[in-house]
Image: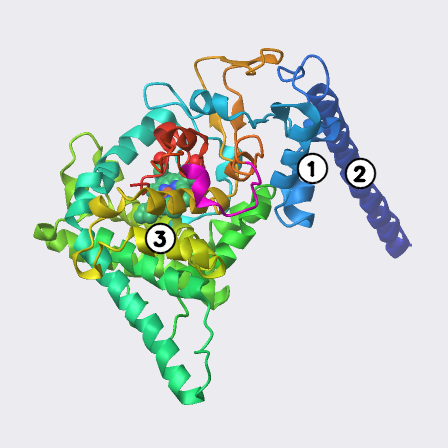
Amino acid sequence: MAAALDVARHAAEQTTIRRALAGVAVAYAGYKVLVALYNISPFHPLSRFPGPRLAAAGYFYEAYYDWIRGGKYTQEIKRMHEKYGPIVRINPDELHCNDPLFTDEIYAGPGRVRDKWYHQLNTGGAGPVSVTAFSTVPHEVHKMKKAPYARFFSRQQIAKLEGEVLDAAQLVTNKMLSIAQSSKKASESQHGEVFDVKDAFNCYTADVIGQYAFGTSMGFITQEGWTPNFATWVKSFLQSAYTMRHNAVARKVAQYIPLMADYMGEDIATVMRQMNVVIPGYIQAALDDPENGRVFAEVLQNKSLPDSYKDMFHLSGEGFNFLLAGTETTAAILTVITYHLLHQPAIYKRLMQTLDDTSPSTLKWSHLENKPYFWAIVQESLRIMPGVSHRSARIARDEDLHYKSASGDVVYVVPRGTPIGMSSVINHMDPGLFPDPEAFRPERWLLEDGSPNYKLQKYLLAFSRGSRSCIGEK
Ligand code: HEM
């Protein structure tokens, strides 16, 4: 009898728990439906902006493109612009613009407040890399963090360390040629060993950044072969970035990655070792030798930066970020240039003619940058391979932004506090700005008399613009 009562009580408890859980699920679903209804209602501050209703209703629309379609939301945004016009609502809270004439309003200079947006920084980055200037939301804190590093990437400073960049270029070129020559001899064929030139450039760019920032090359060029290199290690981290944005649980777990790194595969373990052990080691060596003129010793002396941003955790975050932001991007541009020079011999020939007064042993950037055709090739490569493909929204916290299309027929007021961004891959492929946009055509950057068409540069978004633009652009 007692046993039967126990069973009945247990069953009743189970039913109560199930009902309670179902109640919570229904309440949560009801809440989500109410939020979605509000998002598409005329009461929402962005209700006047066009776009798919589903995208405005909730984040599931964007998440579908990020998760199921492998990060292809930018293509969907491009389609939205074709259908709805120059400013579209791409999720409940964010707008996207494809009118290049509005660029300097969105990406304004340091005198106007522009915050970043958490939604886009939710990439699962953990440890030192999550406290960098790049990952900082508030305008004022970002400005304070970026300034002491930005000085080190000035034209003047780069000219000072140009010789180190050139030495690495010579080293990587020699290695490429020797691989090609030795395998040619071995096989007696017309073709040398095939290797992925992007791997070679990834070795080159990581070594240059290591040398430039820490005073120590990372030794990728001098290793046997081209892999692994820094880009190989961070690939798995970058591939998961899209999905992390929509998954708060995964982001929470990612915060413990530094503790669990050894169990998460070799690449993640290596990235964590680089960020937490190797790079702090380089930085400590640079600090111990302040005469070597690297950025970190100077940062410690900076009076405007509070001490709380000068510990090894913050310094190695910035150091790691230089590699993260500067390796793959620059290697991709060099790869695109190499491909098109080989693919279109006429471009290669014209470039060589332009450079016939230039010798590798006396090469200087100040000489190269005054060669219009060389400059045009660089601009065209930045256009066609923008390095960063994702939109990056800015928030004008203190001011409404007033948009008016060139024809004057589309007018909007973007309410203050609204994230709004642009995508270089959309702007750079606009046939109105760059006719036949898929074609690699350096000539489009030159005026009829062969001089650089600097005016076209204002349509280039490769390095972003304004207060948050690339520190490595020079
Ligand atoms: C062709 C090569 C490069 C391209 C296309 C590129 C592109 C960009 C873009 C688009 C941004 C803005 C990102 C955003 O808005 O969220 C950015 C920021 C940044 N880049 Fe680059 N980059 C390149 C090379 C480099 C190099 C060589 C370095 C350093 C060694 C570097 C360091 C940085 C840093 C530190 C930031 C953050 C700036 C800030 O906090 O305001 N980049 N880059």
Q: Nearer the viewer, mark 1 or mark 3?
A: 3
Q: Is residue 295 left or right of residue 4?
A: left
Which image quarter has ligand 1? top left
Assign a secondary structure to mark 2. helix
Q: Are marks 1 and 3 in contact (CB under 8 Å)?
A: no
Residue plotted at (43% across, 31% down): 456
Cβ of mark 2 under 8 A from ligand 1: no
Q: Find disc 1 in the rendering and name its residue.
A: 60
Quick check: can you spot residue 224? no
Assign a secondary structure to mark 3. helix
Q: Find disc 3 in the rendering and name its residue.
A: 351
- Mark number displayed over residue 22: 2
The spot of residue 70 in percent (x, y) is 64, 50
Residue 405 falls in which quadrant of the image? top right
Amino acid type at circle 3 is Leu
Q: Colour scheme of this structure image?
A: rainbow
| Residue 462 magenta-highlighted | no
Which contiguous range is marked in magenta?
A: 435-445
